[in-house]
């Protein structure tokens, strides 16, 4: 607590003033946390002063609050590129990052518990504090202004990705709130960046990248292995399933859930906590993506059947604790994509599910499963809407790769197992059967004509994106996992 107060005073976070008569005072409190390493050992004890931002009023003591953070797809893409190009990955952390953000609004706070000051004085905040609604935005604005002084530019396709290209090479920085990955082929530029950051912020050099936002990164001569073993282990303990039997698949084959299944849970808190943790676990576990997609649809009023499904997913995770993604050092940096859809698979509203996965040759960097917003009147329509969503992701990735100097000189191969959808994409004659998806038709065809896409037919049995659209039998499930290049890391 004393270290935190010293940091607040060093950055001149507030001025002690008389309480204003026309302003509401915001309270604050201390939050304590034990920080651990990836092996579970204690790294340090941490105390943080947090503002009670829930008492703020829009238009009075805050305005805009949005602040960009790196997309998880950007993290995976950068790691895949770094593995192939054998770039050294380092990690840095900004101490008390939000305290660097400069406030534009007038915010008055009651003195912190345990802080000695003159009686009847309040704190007029000059810098942002954790808990303030505008704190993330103020911090990112400060960081953006600072790093651009070193000639770094922000990507137009991920604002938290900063690059600098010189004759000596490229330096890349990816920011997620106060954690950052630094890499590139300009070793002198990387050291210059580190020194620059230390001059402007209180920094902590964490050395080679090994543990980032709960993601464990294992580096070897043949590439990188990305997993969430510790996170998954903690989740199993929280669910009380450390001694349970394991399952071969996250869902029973052909299972379907409705909002009326089973009986309502008396307390949905644990259900929501477990599903929320499962959602974050899908960052490196595409194998549970569809199952988590299903159970997350019942967060508002979960029932016993849905809770049983969550426990089955966790029992499956227990048997596959060391699964993760491998990014090969010999993989070519060429995009290829697979798109699929399950027609009218939801028994409640008969909407279809879109599923796609995108590789940098053998490195899986992006995937998604999503219920379509409209009910499709045919399997072709469902597949075509999935193609449109996949095309959007492909275009974004091509632009992001260009920012990372990984240009795609040839069209991106997009595999689809529905021949009718492929024929519609190449056919410029519209009729009654395609009028309701005409916008998607124009969108896909436009990028086909620009040679950014190349549609290829693929057999249903060879379609890896099928994993994201429906449950499967154990044999079929294992086959699809092998196509996604999901591997098991050896226990350490």
Image (cartoon, rainbow, N blue to C red):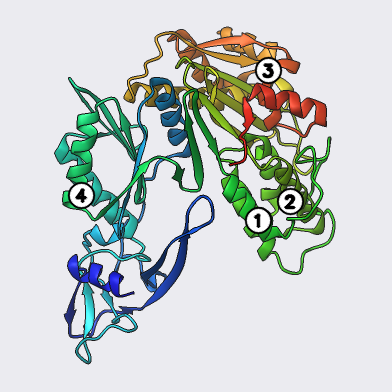
| Residue of label 3 | 433
| Residue of label 2 | 310
Query: Closer to us: mark 2 or mark 3?
Result: 2
SS type, badge 1: helix
Q: CA distance from mark 3 to mark 1?
A: 43 Å
Q: Do tag 2 and tag 1 residues touch (Cβ < 8 Å)?
A: yes
Q: CA distance from mark 4 to mark 3?
A: 61 Å
SS type, badge 2: helix
Residue 458 in the image, given as x and y percentages of width and height: 68, 11
Q: Residue 198 got which mark?
A: 4
Query: Closer to us: mark 1 or mark 4?
Result: 4
Q: Residue at x 21, y 34 (%)?
A: 152
Look at the image and tell me in which quarter the C terminus lies. top right
Quadrant of res 196: top left
Q: Choose the circle earlier in sequence order: 3 or 1.
A: 1
Q: Do tag 1 and tag 4 residues touch (Cβ < 8 Å)?
A: no
Residue 11 in the image, given as x and y percentages of width and height: 19, 65
Residue 10 in the image, given as x and y percentages of width and height: 18, 67
């Amino acid at each position: 607590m004393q270290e935190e107060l010293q940091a607040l005073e060093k950055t001149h976070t507030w001025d002690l003033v008389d309480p204003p008569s026309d302003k509401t005072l915001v309270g604050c409190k201390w939050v304590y946390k034990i920080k651990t390493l990836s092996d579970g050992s204690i790294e340090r004890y941490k105390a943080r002063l947090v503002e009670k931002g829930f008492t703020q009023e829009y238009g009075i003591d805050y305005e805009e609050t949005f602040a960009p953070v790196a997309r998880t797809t950007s993290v995976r893409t950068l790691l895949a590129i770094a593995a192939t190009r054998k770039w050294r990955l380092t990690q840095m952390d900004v101490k008390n990052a939000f305290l660097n953000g400069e406030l534009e609004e007038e915010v008055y706070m009651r003195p912190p518990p345990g802080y000695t000051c003159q009686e009847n004085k309040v704190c007029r905040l000059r810098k942002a504090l954790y808990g303030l609604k505008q704190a993330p935005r103020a911090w990112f604005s400060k960081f953006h202004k600072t790093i651009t002084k070193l000639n770094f530019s922000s990507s137009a396709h991920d604002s938290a990705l900063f690059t600098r290209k010189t004759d000596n090479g490229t330096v890349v920085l990816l920011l997620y709130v106060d954690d950052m990955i630094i890499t590139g082929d300009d070793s002198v530029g990387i050291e210059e960046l580190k020194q620059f950051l230390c001059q402007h912020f209180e920094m902590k050099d964490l050395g080679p990248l090994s543990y980032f936002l709960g993601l464990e990164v294992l580096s070897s001569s043949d590439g990188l292995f990305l997993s969430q073993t510790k996170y998954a282990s903690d989740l199993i303990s929280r669910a009380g399933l450390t001694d349970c039997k394991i399952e071969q698949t996250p869902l029973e084959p052909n299972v379907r859930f409705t909002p009326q299944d089973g009986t309502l849970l008396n307390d949905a808190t644990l259900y929501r906590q477990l599903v929320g943790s499962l959602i974050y676990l899908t960052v490196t576990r595409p194998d549970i993506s569809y199952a988590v997609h299903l159970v997350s649809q019942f967060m508002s009023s979960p029932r016993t059947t849905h809770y049983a499904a969550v426990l089955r997913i966790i029992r499956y995770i227990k048997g596959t604790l060391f699964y993760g993604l491998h990014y090969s050092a010999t993989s070519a940096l060429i995009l290829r994509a697979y798109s699929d859809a399950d027609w009218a698979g939801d028994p409640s509203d008969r909407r279809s599910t879109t599923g796609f996965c995108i590789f940098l040759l053998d490195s899986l960097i992006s995937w998604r499963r999503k219920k379509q917003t409209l009910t499709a009147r045919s399997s072709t329509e469902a597949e075509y809407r999935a193609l449109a969503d996949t095309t959007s992701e492909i275009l974004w990735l091509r632009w992001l790769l260009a920012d990372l100097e990984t240009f795609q000189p040839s069209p991106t191969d997009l595999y689809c197992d529905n021949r009718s959808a492929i024929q519609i994409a190449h056919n410029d004659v519209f009729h009654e059967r395609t009028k309701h998806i005409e916008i998607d038709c124009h969108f896909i065809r436009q990028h086909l004509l620009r040679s950014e896409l190349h549609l290829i037919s693929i057999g249903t049995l060879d379609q890896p994106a099928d994993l994201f659209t429906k449950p499967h039998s154990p044999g079929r499930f294992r086959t699809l996992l092998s196509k996604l290049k999901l591997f098991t890391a050896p226990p350490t």
